[in-house]
Image (cartoon, rainbow, N blue to C red):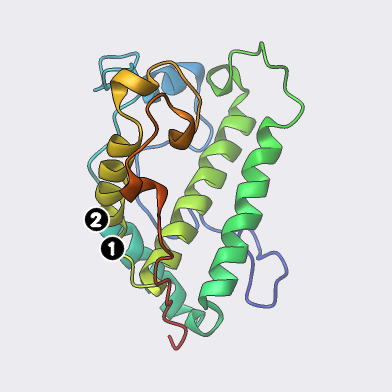
Amino acid sequence: LVRAPGGGPQAEPEFPPWGLSCSVQSNPSSVGREKLRGAGGESTDASGLLGFNPEPTIEDIRRLHAEFAAERDWDQFHKPRNLLLALVGDVGELAELFQWKPDEEPGPQTWPPKEWAALQEELSDVLIYLVALAARCRVDLPQAVLSKMDTNRRRYPAHLSRGSSRKYTDLPHGATSEDQTVGTTDLACESTH
């Protein structure tokens, strides 16, 4: 849900609310949903998951949101704490879409178009707020992801963690001492913008 600076809901926002131009249908047919899931020959990864379009990039999303906020003079409200709380709120709205659905349900692939559109909107809200928070905190998100994946590879070697949901400290042979003594990271966010 897009909220106006006073905290109340904004009038029906343009879709998507941050002006992103994309080929996702707001009310897709079942054929359109199948196409989005890679059934029509789109790129998929080794696990069969949908491969994303290369555009917009995370930098494009950051820039589009920054322009959107600047046009409305909302930067004054986009302090790290506010962005984090907005992110958490939208994660809650995303969770609501899955709440009380039976575990044996096939999942979003079979949801009605209205629920599918809501899923797209909430996932977009979460991503946009995450990118905005990272930018405000001066975290280069793509580089942070690459670094975190390297850390995860060390902590969860495939030969020790395949098929296991154990935390890295509980895996056979443990983790390296470097991984067990994770220090606090300087999370100094820029709060003056």
Which amino acid, mark 1? Answer: Asp
Q: How far apart are marks 1 and 2 (CA)?
A: 6 Å
Front residue of 134 and 114? 134
Rendered position, 49 above or below 167 = above
> Which residue is found at the position 58% from the left and 19% from the top?
107
Q: Is mark 2 on a helix, strand or loop?
A: helix
In the rendered image, the residue lying farthest to the bottom is 192
Residue 56 visible in rendering: no
Q: Residues within 10 Å of mark 2 (few under 14, many from 20)?
A: few
Q: Where is the C terminus found, in terms of image quarters?
A: bottom left
Residue denoted by label 1 = 140
- Which corner quadrant of the image does residue 37 belong to? top left
Q: Residue at x 63, y 32 (%)?
A: 114
What kind of element bears circle 1? Answer: loop
Kindly indicate the quadrant of the structure image that contains residue 140: bottom left
Find disc 2 in the rendering and name its residue: 143
Tell me the quarter of the image containing the N terminus.
bottom right
